[in-house]
Image (tube, grey):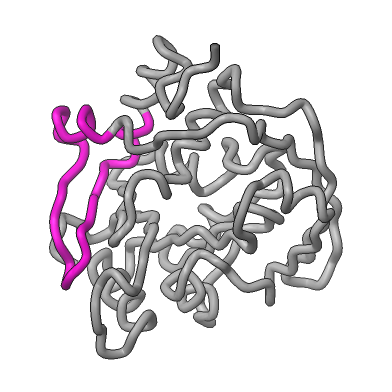
Amino acid sequence: MELGLTKGASVLVHSSLKSLGWVQGGADAVVGALMDAVGPEGTVMVPNLPFRGTLTRYLETQPTFDVRSTPSLMGAITEALRKRPDARRSLHSSHSVAAVGALRDEMTRDHEKCDTTCGVHSAYYKNAHRDNAFILMIGVTLNNMTTFHSVEETNELPYLFSGKVYASHVIDYEGRKVTISTRGYNDNVRREFTAPEPMLLKEHVMTLGKVAEAECRLMDAQATFDLVERTVKKDPYFLLAQRPT
């Protein structure tokens, strides 16, 4: 991985294995390369969402999420990291994160305390509030950028929440079942998370490059969060494809 990841960095990775072309060793090899890039003092994280479609439809099923066995539906690389014996996964029914490395426990701890998907106890938020932390997109666009949900949630953007709260169940590593509550999203808005890309490039917060056949984006996590947060404070609808009438 030659996009600028440094030893000791923490990196949240959104990925498409297919975008890389043929990779000897497959998804496991990609996880290994990421871990080599940041070294033993670094941390690699991936989203481990167990659903496709809208958050509302998923939460309406009152799902049970088992941190030990519920698969990630975010692609082969995320599932490969989840299955590693040295991986740890955050306890959240919809937006769990799996991590390996030095900050594994810190990044995955207390996610279940959030009453939203990506709040201050989530790895999405934590990674964006520390030094030497990055977000890497491998073959996917910023429309996959879960950290932008942290910006939306922590700034209580006016379009975001539906007003409904959903109960779901999580089973921890000791087999204990806990009920958590999550504020639902408004499904009647469409986001355009690629909107910040021009300013991220202009401010030298994002670097473009290629790994194998995949187009990649590497961002300074804290600078990205801060820049987008400043923007939505001025324009709360900046991340939407269409402004409400």
Place of residue 244 in the rendered image (x, y in percent of width and height, measured from the top left)? 54, 16
Q: State the residue in front, 235 or 132.
A: 235
* Residue at (60% x, 17% y) in the render: 158
* Residue at (25% x, 35% y) in the render: 197
* Residue at (55% x, 62% y) in the render: 48
Asked if residue 221 lies in the magenta stretch, the reply is yes
Asked if residue 244 lies in the magenta stretch, the reply is no
Residue furthest to the front in view is 245
* Residue 155 appears left or right of 145: right
Which quarter of the image is occupied by the C terminus?
Answer: top right
Q: In this picture, is 234 found above or below 110?
A: above
Residue furthest to the bottom in view is 25
Q: In this picture, is 1 found above or below 86?
A: above
Place of residue 179 in the rendered image (x, y in percent of width and height, measured from the top left)? 85, 52
Q: Quadrant of residue 24?
A: bottom left
* Residue 48 appears left or right of 127: right
Q: In this picture, is 75 found above or below 110?
A: below
* Residue 48 appears left or right of 222: right
Q: State the residue in front, 188 or 202.
A: 188
Q: Quadrant of residue 165?
A: top right
Place of residue 136 in the rendered image (x, y in percent of width and height, measured from the top left)? 30, 54
Place of residue 60 in the rendered image (x, y in percent of width and height, measured from the top left)? 81, 49
Which quarter of the image is occupied by the N terminus?
Answer: bottom left
From which residue to which does the magenta span run? 197-225
